[in-house]
Amino acid sequence: MDASEAVKRFNEYLKSHQHKLTKQRALITEIFFDPDKRSEHPTVEELYLRVKERDRNVGHATIYRTLKLLIEAGLAVPNRIGEGLTRYEPEIPGEHHDHMICDRCGLIVEFEDEEIERLQEEIAKKLGFSLLDHSMNLVGSPQEPCQRPDCLNQGS
Ligand SMILES: [Zn+2]
Ligand SMILES: [Zn+2]
């Protein structure tokens, strides 16, 4: 799903709920779904800074409210990662991944593992549930210097 498709879907959701797709909401959605930055998992503040580069009049409250609407529309998911800040990421239908996180700088590496997915299904089943969703965040210290140059984890 590309950014324009996401904006289109958001518009449909807003219309059916008596909301409007304002220019700012469209811009926020476009930036949030930017394919180059999709794995960034921005906080409200980080998304605000990115949007502000394109529209200086946008405020924190608008970012926050738009994210909330995107979540309601099934286009975004909040995820508490590591340091306790809520980070947000686009919800792409049919796509799933888990997170490996650097304990120092919060760098997020996305991964997908069939074996783990299968095991989770099994565990849920054993416990008498049918699995609907899960989120997994692994936290670790990188063995090689962290990919982020300003990180204090420079290998051990
Ligand atoms: Zn790091
Ligand atoms: Zn992710």
Image: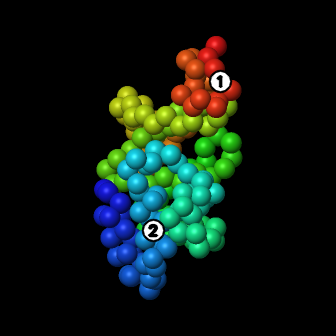
Q: Is mark 2 within 8 Å of ligand 2?
A: no
Residue 133, position as x, y percentages in the image: 45, 49
Residue in the image at 53% along x and 54% along y: 88
Earlier-in-chain disc, 1 versus 2: 2
So how many labels did they put on this image? 2
Q: Which residue is mark 1?
A: 153
Residue 42, position as x, y percentages in the image: 55, 51
Up/down of 97 relative to 73, above or below:
above
Residue 116, position as x, y percentages in the image: 42, 31
Along the viewing direction, whichever of 58 and 121 lies nearer the viewer: 58
Residue in the image at 62% along x and 37% along y: 106
Image quadrant occupied by the N terminus: bottom left
Visible residue check, residue 103: no
Q: Which residue is mark 2?
A: 27
Q: Report helix, strand or loop for mark 1.
A: loop
Q: Residues within 10 Å of mark 2 (few under 14, many from 20)?
A: some
Q: Is mark 1 within 8 Å of ligand 1?
A: yes
Along the viewing direction, whichever of 101 and 94 lies nearer the viewer: 101
Up/down of 107 relative to 132, above or below:
above
Q: State the mark number for residue 143.
A: none
Residue in the image at 46% along x and 79% along y: 22
How far separated are the C-alphas under marks 1 and 2? 35 Å
Kind of residue sitting beneath label 2:
Leu
Q: Evaluate if marks 1 and 2 touch, with contact meaning CB atoms under 8 Å apart.
A: no
Up/down of 86 relative to 116, above or below:
below
Along the viewing direction, whichever of 109 and 134 lies nearer the viewer: 109
Kind of residue sitting beneath label 1:
Asn
User: Quick check: 66 left or right of 104?
Assistant: left
